Structures are given as structure tokens and as C-alpha cells.
Image: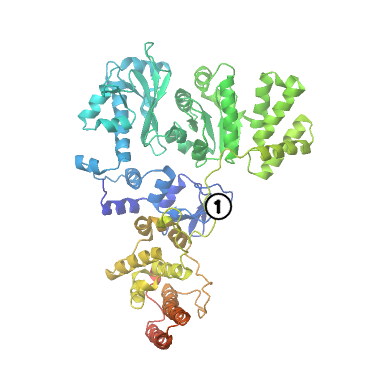
Amino acid sequence: MRIPQEKIDQVRDATDIVDLIGAFVKLKKRGKNFVGLCPFHTEKTPSFNVSPDRQMYHCFGCGVGGNVFTFIMEFEKVSFIEAVRSLAEKAGIALPQGSASDDEAASEQENLYELCREAGLFYYKALTESTEGKFALEYFHKRGFSDETIRSFGLGYSPNSWDAFLKFAQQKGVPVPLIEKAGLVRKRDDGSYFDYFRGRAMFPIFSPAGRVLGFGARKLREDDPLGKYINSPETGIYNKSRVLYGLSQSKEFIREKDFVVLVEGYADLITVFQAGVGNVVASSGTALTAEQILLLSRYTRNITIMYDADSAGSSAALRGVDLILERDLDVRVAPLPQGDDPDSYVRKHGGKAFETLLENAVSFVDFIAQTFERQGKLSTPEGKAQTVRTIVRTISKMSDELKRNFYIKHVAEKYKLYESTLYREIEKIFRSEKPAFNPPRYEKSSVSTRSGSAGPGTALPEIPRIERDLIGALLRGGYQTVAVVMRFLNEEDIAHPESRKVIRKLFDAAENQEQVNPSDLIDKFPESKRWLTDLIVSKHQISKRWGQERSGLTEGSPLKIAIDCVRKLKYDALKRLQQENVQKQKKAAGQGEDPLPYVVLGKQLQERISSELKDLESQLREIPAEGTSESSE
């Protein structure tokens, strides 16, 4: 559904970009801007800049940039409409609701989100308002969940019926194929449909932004033939490898404490959270993935694993340690007593005792050693060698060489081995293994040089520095400066298609005596957002690499810089005509044709160049030395 432009502008104006990004990234004030570690790539020196004046962000390391909408889109992996709606909700701005015809035009992804939201409300009401749901509510209460916790996590109950939710959704006018795509119904061989979740305790799975993606469902009846837990299948909005249960509720606590506790199951997380440890997430009983670690790295670099104390839990913890170290994060492990999981331990001993376990968390080196010791492997030379090799293999996952060296030194001292022996083991690993996870890397070259708008495998040519300089001056100078430049510059004088589109937008606004919001350009030209945000947020340092004398005007008012750019662009455009004519002369001579017409044309072009440049200089001198554009600075 299309959101009116005036509503989009209202949401943008009501959202402060420093407050928004500051909730996800630790920002420090530096001059007029704020800086922090980029949430979109791994770095140790802050290169992520946020400009409160321009309401934009830009990373000088990986090149990402944009405004409040693009940040939510990239950080939460949502569509533009979803980003607008999310920010509108936070700002208390009501957006128009879609009619049936609007729903048909809306994206399937939006429809899936809305359907899952309705399903979550349906299951919650079935738990709290229906007679049948009372025994499910009693189950949650026996687990120790308070009514407030049940409400906070949106827990619910799926009626023990073949078509309770199916009928509900159809009454809402939802097409059955969409309900199937959301993973809420299944199709029989005869073509009819039935509810996928029936007679189960329901755990909605939320995105970090708080939108329902899918469900986990626990068995309540003995005659239920399916497993103890079943989950929504993969859908257009739910990918279990990229989701962490409870992150929507815990993310603020994680930022505040700067570490996260990683548990396995839904009940584990809810019990721990209710006991006062808010910085907790769950891998939902599935194997921890690299994508989940990447998601956590947006909130903290410190992870404490607390899985079940059995052998399966220990193995899962060991795999998790490797994944975390590959992502260059710090990890500790908090072992539980045998026979306990986080849920049972908290119910027996309380939240304070659980916090004590966290305080006594051990390094991954000690955890591996303790795991092998319980298995009796430290009693033999072969077992000790296996233990050390396992530890060294885990250390080899680290990309930080300095940290890796300290751990090698620590292990050598712990097991009374030569460091050189351990380094030889690491060399063997490096030769035989490739990293299991390579995080996405952004191109390190200048973010102004390439664009994906030309299609896969066909990058556009580099945007000329002179054109970047001109656009920077026009943006800072406002429509008064643009109006002056319009008198002398044609769109044909601009070589690159992306910069030509931006300048056309500025020209159109100047004709209506309108200022252009730099942030608005990001929405209008998403394919150009990298070099535009680089230009805007950095205040764009004027290039000194034009290859021509610039009369010392490397600094000055926006109007002065813009005029200097016009001189150079007009000169380049006219020189291109002359060079094309020279090539025509050579081609004619090579083919035995008379080159005289081109020689004559060349002389005429030379005269035209001299005349036009002279006329241009004469007109430019009539412009006041001080422009009227300083106010925008």
C-alpha cells in the first residue's frame, strides 16, 4: 500500500537520527557529528558517522549510508514501507490503513506480516479468553510464568481443532494460499486445508523490531502424534537461521550491560528473563548459525553461552564457540550443574544464583578442558593431545592475531608445552582448513566510484570528482546557488547518469524556489545513496585532482565553488567536441578522404570555445562576490 509523501515526510521529521541509531550503536560526539563502530561490518576503529544537522549516516569504512528509513531497512532487513510504519509507530504518527483493494496491491511480505500478527492475537485470545484455553494457561502458570510475562511475550494457545484458525482467517478475507505461505495451514492430498498448529502452547517468534515472523508450538496432549516442539516452516518473512528468540524483548538490556546470555529454548529464555536477567536470547533449540552471531554482533561483542549440561548441550556450546570466535567476538561459557537447564536451575535456585553462574563463566579454553575431563580424556597422553588439539583448532578460528597469540601463550603455560609446538599445529590447520564463515565484506575502494544501477556485472564508470564537487556545493548553497548555476550549465554538460539525475532534481526544485532536503535525495535515488551520503555527511572535501589549475579556489563559499565547477565543466564539454573532431580528421585521412572539412570545423570549434569561455567568464564576473547561500551552512 502506498503511503502518502506528506506522511513519509512527517515521520522523517519526527525521528531524530542520533536517537534512533544511538539505540543500536554506541555513539560519541565528535565536533558536530557523532561516531561509532559500524553495525554493518566488523571494525575496531570507529568510521561510522552520524550527522544530526543533515539527519544522515555514513560509514567511511564500508560505504553504507542513508537516512532514518534506510538505516531501519538495512539494520532490520525490512522493506521501505515496513521501515516507515515502524518509525511511525514509535513517533505516534497514524498512517492510513489499507482497504481490501490496497491489500491486493500491497507486497506479499507485508501481507504475511499482517497475517502473522493476526494469528498471534488469535492464539493469545484463545489462551486468555476461551474455556478450552484454560488448561494451557494453567500449564504456563505451572511453569512459573506470570500473567505479565505471558502478555509481554504474547504467549498463546492453538485450539484443538482442524480448522479453527483457518475459519478465522477466511472470515477476515485472507486468501487460503496466503495462509499456507505463512505456514499456518497445510494442504491435504484431496486439496482441502487444515490448521498446522492444533492444541498446543504457542510461542510467537518476533523480529528485532517486534513483528511476528512465525511460531514455536509445544505439545500439551499425550495423543498429539507430533514432536514435543514444532515450528513454523521457512516463509517469506521467517528464516530460522537468521532469528533469535527473545531479541525483541532483550535488545535494550543487551546494549545496557554490553553482553548477552545465549540459551537454547523458549522456556529457558522466558524463565531467565522473568528472573531479572534481561540480556538473554535463545537459539530456539536449533543449531546456532553464523547469521545469528552476526545479528548479535549488532548489539554487543560479548557472549556468554549457557546450554544444557548434558553431552548434546556441551557439543552445541563447542560449535557455538567456534562460530563466535570466527566472527571476532568474545565468548565465555557458564556451565550448569548436571541434570539442569537454565529453566530448571532458575526455578530451583532463583535469579540471583543464576547471575552467580554467569559471573563464574569460564573461558572457552577452560570449558573445553572441563568437558574433556568429564569424559575422562585427561587421564591419558592421547586424551590430553586430543584436548589440546581441540583447543588449538578453536583458537585458530580467531581473526585477531594478537588475541590468538595470547591464547597460544596461555595454553602453552597451562599444559607445559612449547609455544612453537602449538604454532605448528595452527599452521597445519591453516593449510588444511578454510574458514567456515566468511562475513560479508564491502568494497574498500572509494564509495563514490561505483553503482549497481547498471545491472549485474556491469558497473557504471566512476563519477567524476568535479561533478561530486558541484553537487556538494549545490546542496550546501541551497536553491539560490542552484538558480545561478542553472543559467550557465546544461544537463548535457554532466557526464555521469547518476549525478545528472541528482542535478536535474536540484534544478527542478530551484525553479519552484524550494530547498532540497539532502535526506530526501536518498529516498529518491537509492542507487546513489553511498556516494551521496559520503558527500553529504563528510561535508565533502573539495577535490584537488582535476588536473587543471583552479585559481586557488579549493575553499570558499558554496557559490564560489559552484562557479569554479561550472567553468571546468563547460571547458571540458567544449574540449570534448574538439577532441572528437580531431579523431574524425584522423579517420578521414586514414580512409583516403579529404580531411579539409574537419580542419575547417576544428578551427571553428576553437573559435567557438574561446568565444563561449570568454562570454562565460564575463557573465560570471557579474555575479556578486559573496553568494546568498551561506545561510544553509
Question: What is the quadrant of residue 187 in the picture?
Answer: top left
Question: Is residue 633 something one can see in this rendering?
Answer: no
| Pick the front one: 164 or 535 | 164
**Is 158 left, or right, of 416 in this rendering?**
left
Q: Dot 1: few (<14), some (14–19), or many (≥20) neighbours within 10 Å? A: some
Colour style of the rendered protein structure: rainbow
Q: How many marks?
A: 1
Question: What is the quadrant of residue 418 in the picture?
Answer: top right
Which residue position holds label 1?
46
**Is 50 left, or right, of 483 in this rendering?**
right
Quadrant in which the N terminus is drawn: top left
> At 42% across and 18% down in the image, what residue appears?
227
Question: Is residue 348 something one can see in this rendering?
Answer: yes
**Is 440 left, or right, of 602 in this rendering?**
right
Residue 496: image location, x then y, percent = 41, 66
Quadrant in which the C terminus is drawn: bottom left
| Pick the front one: 190 or 315 | 190
| Pick the front one: 65 or 192 | 192
Residue 46: image location, x then y, percent = 55, 52
**Element on which disc 1 rests:** loop
Question: What is the quadrant of residue 439 in the picture?
Answer: top right
In this view, 211 is above or below 36 = above
Three-letter residue code for mark 1: Pro
Residue 8: image location, x then y, percent = 30, 52
Q: Residue furthest front?
A: 592
> At 35% across and 71% down in the image, what residue appears?
491
Residue 34: image location, x then y, percent = 49, 54
